[in-house]
Image: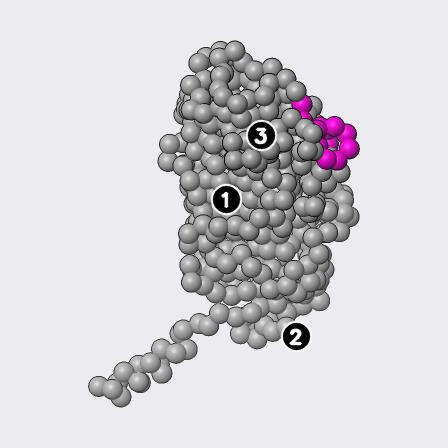
Amino acid sequence: MRRIIIALMILLMPCLAEAKSLYVAANGNDSITYANNTLDAPWRTVSKALMSAQAGDTVYFRAGTYTISSKISVSTSGTIASPITITSYQSEPVTWQTSPSLRDPAIAMDGVSYWTFSYLTVHYAYSGTLTDPYGDRGFWRVGFDSACTHITWDHIAGTSNATGDNFGIIHIKAGCHYATVRNSTFQFPTGGHVSTAGVIIFTSDYFTVENNHFINGGSSFYNKHSNSTCTHNKFRYNYIEQNYAGHYGYFSNSNAVDMQHNIIYAPTATAGAVTIGDANGGKPNPLQDNLWRHNTIIGKFYTKYDLGGCLYNSLNYNIITGNLLQNDGMMDPRMTSYTYNLIGGSVSPSISGNGNIIGPTPTFVGTGGYGKQASIGNYALRSDSYGYQACPDGTDMGADVTKVGPEGSPSDTPEGSPSDTAEGSPSDTAGGGISSPSGLTIIKQQ
């Protein structure tokens, strides 16, 4: 019997694939087989790499710019023990860009799990507004036809010339649970379509969006169509910089999102630096149980009543320099908690709570009063400012700036997520502007 078992093990050994380190280079060759791929014999294209990688593999891209001219459909999954990792090789700068004519997603992922993308610069080159049948697009589009789980993006520098309805550099559809986006920067040249975002997430649970920098877009971050099953989501330590009027900084139809220590700069956003509860898209679900704490919001804060209402949310220890308008003044907000906030504008008459400071504006350590600051660290309160050490525990109202932005506070990784540490760390400065992705700079904490 022992000899039979040994013989069977020998026969099965060739079928047990081992995880590999795979390589891609600008001077590579896609005709190289999977087995023969090495550092000295790399592949050439993004599509070859993504369509060849197997569970447990790590694909390293050498320095260069890689153009994606048609949609890449990913169909292979990693596992909890053997995720698939796509990253740059050591500190080499890597850019993926679409061809200017491509209007499809660059990378479409359906029905797959346990992928990590890290230390990459990506650029969606099409210029203009994408309309039907080209809505719901992005550089990555995840779960459009079949839900995905446990997809992670870490240290991504993303830019786009395109905007459009439900366009996101990372576009995550309903049911794609355990998505993580961290330590990344997303930038648009203008505001664009109101539903354009650096990251857009539909009805999904257990997402974590942390330590990112969002610049412009119609809604810099958009969480859409949540329902009562979405109760474990986190949006924290992010810096949103919305420079265009008529748009949003943070736009959300969300339930039970823990939103803490974010800085949201959108003083001219007539639609609100923050808007939650707008039932955009016709989903009649009440938006409730969101927890806002220790956020610094430069602009207005709206909680609106459209179809399902916006009820039982908590707002504690925040700075809001503009008006706080609950349900546009239409209905009883039934807010669970509203304490120790510094509100620079007016407050809806139906809102009441303890320890709030209404009327004065904060003074930050940087220049410009409470306007836009040159760095994240400059959003800290001066010792003579309203809100300084004014919370019951002696902390400041507003965000703790030492936690905010790329490379900020470490994460508590969601259960089952693959490792987010990639070999090598290229410079956080991806190199050249919106027209050329080489000028996007990730702002670090001070």
Q: What residue lies at 44% left-to-right and 21% top-to-bottom?
A: 335
- Residue furthest to the left in view is 1
Confirm or deny contact between disc 1 and disc 2 (CB under 8 A).
no
For the residues marked 3 and 2, what is the alpha-carbon distance in whole angstroms? 60 Å
Q: Is residue 178 left or right of residue 242?
A: left
Considering only order in the chain, which callout, 2 or 1, is on the residue closer to the N terminus?
2
- Mark drawn on residue 208: 1
Image quadrant where residue 10 sits: bottom left
Q: Is residue 334 above or below residue 174?
A: above
Q: Nearer the viewer, residue 337 or 16?
A: 337
SS state under label 3: loop
Q: Which residues are magenta?
A: 361-372
For the residues marked 3 and 1, what is the alpha-carbon distance in whole angstroms? 29 Å
Mark 2, residue position: 40
- Mark drawn on residue 390: 3
Mark toward the viewer: 3 or 1: 3
Q: What residue lies at 48% left-to-right and 12% top-to-bottom?
A: 350
Residue 306: x and y in percent read: 47, 18
Image quadrant where residue 59 sits: bottom right
Mark toward the viewer: 1 or 2: 1
Amino acid beneath label 3: Ala
Amino acid beneath label 2: Asp
Q: Is residue 373 left or right of residue 290?
A: right
Q: Is residue 375 visible?
A: yes
Confirm or deny contact between disc 3 and disc 1 (CB under 8 A).
no
- Mark drawn on residue 46: none
Would you say residue 235 sits in the magenta stretch? no
Confirm or deny contact between disc 3 and disc 2 (CB under 8 A).
no
